[in-house]
Image: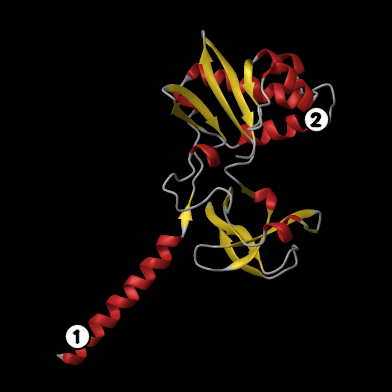
Amino acid sequence: MIQLRKLLISGFIIAVLTCGVAAQERKLYPVDQAGQDQSFKVFRDRLIAAARKKDKQFILSILDPSIELSFGGDRGIKDFNKMYNLDKPNSPFWTELTKVLSLGGAFKATDGRREFVAPYVTSQWPEDGTVDGFEYVAVTGTNVRLRAAPGLSSPIVASLSYDIVKLVDMRQSASERKDGLKWIKVMTGAGKEGYLADKYVRSPIDYRAFFRKIKGNWLMVAFIAGD
């Protein structure tokens, strides 16, 4: 009887420890609610096409006159033109907007106003305070290989699908380039460390866009990065 009790207690401890590890593993699955509002869906389809064609006139036509561009006070069309200069084919705006729009998003209520927030990594990021957006990133694909060292020939440590992972060394990670890819060092919720190609991960405080319907028209009211 005493021996059975010891086994039961031991089993309980193991179960608790297992649950503890599992609780640390967080997922952030893709969400795209654009189809919930047909007017927004049509607008976004046109915006995606414009971004691909680098259609400056269309982009300027859908910017809110007071569009927010930074947390340092940059706002409005004049500041937008200064920051992105759409006359340049290599303006970073085209690349960043395309990335943002390709990752879906969700409708949110901000200060009582309905907005569409893209990408989903930002709109769906956990708000319980357990994963700081400065310290964690989301894997945006399935079966993404975590490698022991930066490089496609490095051994695979784990395969990740839509996991939220912790940045290990942001300064070192930013400089790791190999095989034409940029690699970042992360740690999974299960405690495994390794490198991911950064094209498969995204931070919730990377570029994001906010859209609001104003006087019957959808406008981009913010295009911003950082915090």
The circle drawn on residue 195 is none
Residue neighbourhood size for the residue with mark 1, other residues' Cα within 10 Å, grouped as few (<14), some (14–19), many (≥20): few
How many numbered marks does the figure carry? 2
What residue would you read off at disc 2? 91
Q: Considering only order in the chain, which callout, 1 or 2, is on the residue closer to the N terminus? A: 1
Give the residue displayed 42% in from the left and 67% down from the top.
Answer: 21
Q: Residue at x 80, y 24 (%)?
A: 85
- The kind of residue tagged 1 is Arg
Which quadrant of the figure has residue 94? top right
The one nearer the camera, 41 or 63, is 63
Quarter of the N terminus within the rendering: bottom left
For the point 71% across and 17% down, which residue is it? 77
Q: Quadrant of residue 186?
A: bottom right
Q: Residue furthest front?
A: 72
173 w.r.t. 94: above or below: below
Q: Amino acid at mark 2?
A: Ser
**Image quadrant containing the C terminus:** top right
Return the x and y of residue 120 as percentages of the image width and height: 53, 38
State yes or no: discs 2 and 1 in contact (Cβ < 8 Å). Answer: no
State the residue position of label 1. Answer: 5
SS type, badge 1? helix
204 lies above or below 10: above
Left or right relative to 109: residue 167: right
Residue 29 in the image, given as x and y percentages of width and height:
49, 46
Relative to 214, say whether 93 is above or below. Answer: below
On the question of residue 161 being in view, the answer is: no
Taking depth in this image into account, of 139 and 81 the one nearest to the observer is 81
